[in-house]
Amino acid sequence: MKRQEHFVETSVGSAFVLESGESQQPCCLMIHGWSKSDDHQRWNFMFDSLVLEGFRILAIDMPGFGRSQNARRLFKARSEENLIKDGPVDVIEQILKKFLIQRFYLFGLSWGGGVAISLAIELKSRIFKMFLFMPSYTEQKDELKFINTSCMILWIKEDLIHPCKMGKYLSNRIKLSTLVNHSIETKSISPENYATLIMIRVLKIKIRISFIWQFEVYDQFLMLEMIKSN
């Protein structure tokens, strides 16, 4: 698949953005986690499948991560700072403006999942749907109840950094959310790949019908078992 590399100047420094797919296709915006090793490559194994299904990918290395190393300001891990001036949401809005993106599908991992939640609060109707893999977010003032975006929250029970109770809390607070809470004890693929395959499966099937969350979770995992065995 053809991929293009961009460096977008933002208010806190240059941000690397990997683009794949045709510009007229619906956009999937992807936000990585906060660890030093996190960057756009966390989502690499999703790119070709989504492009084949007719999507455009924008995967960002947030300033200070990956190939965006000349940041004039480093983001903090706490979600309380997501919406401040020159914070993560502000920077992503600048990137969206550069690419002329009005509406998009949103993917977030850990810290990036928390940033995605903040984007859903700030941008509201511009987000088609969200796919969050163990998002890290601390609610401040009852703001989660105002999110009107359909959301799938994926959680791995064995993860020691992200407690399962947080997934349940977020799912209860975000009214249009579905929590996929599963164990990987018997799975031979990584938690990241496992959760990502679920998201791909939902996008492939449900964008073409009216009620996105009526697809049974059991059938999603059955499909993953079939993928793993091939």
Image: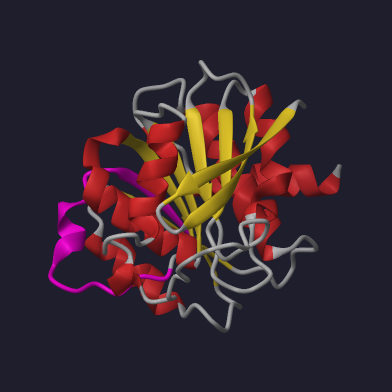
Q: Nearer the viewer, residue 129 or 100?
A: 100
> Is 185 displayed left or right of 164 in the figure?
right
Q: Which residue is depicted at the point 56% across and 65% down?
A: 64
Is 44 rendered above or below residue 105?
A: below
Query: 73 and 120: which one is in front?
Result: 73
On the image, the x and y values in percent for residue 100 come to 41, 26
Q: Is residue 219 visible?
A: no
Q: What colour scheme has been applied to the protein in the rendered image?
A: secondary structure
Q: Is residue 40 magenta?
A: no
Q: Is residue 101 left or right of residue 148?
A: right
Residue at the image point whose x is 23% and y is 63% from the top: 173
In depth, the one of 227 and 9 nearer the eye is 9
Residue sitting farthest toward the right? 230
Q: Position of residue 110 (x, y in %)?
A: 50, 66
Picture coordinates of residue 98 (x, y %)? 44, 33
Image quarter hosting the C terminus: top right
Image spot of residue 202 (x, y percent): 52, 37
**Relative height, residue 209 to residue 196 (above, below):** above
Position of 17 relative to 177 (above/below)? above
The image quarter in which residue 157 lies: bottom right
Position of 167 with respect to 190 (left or right) is left
Q: How many marks?
A: 0
Res 130 → quadrant: top left
Where the N terminus falls, by quadrant? Answer: top right
In front of the other: 224 or 5: 5
Q: Residue at x 54, y 82 (%)?
A: 161
Q: Which residues are magenta?
A: 136-154
Residue 142 lies left or right of residue 126; in this view the side is left
Residue 96 seen in the current view: yes
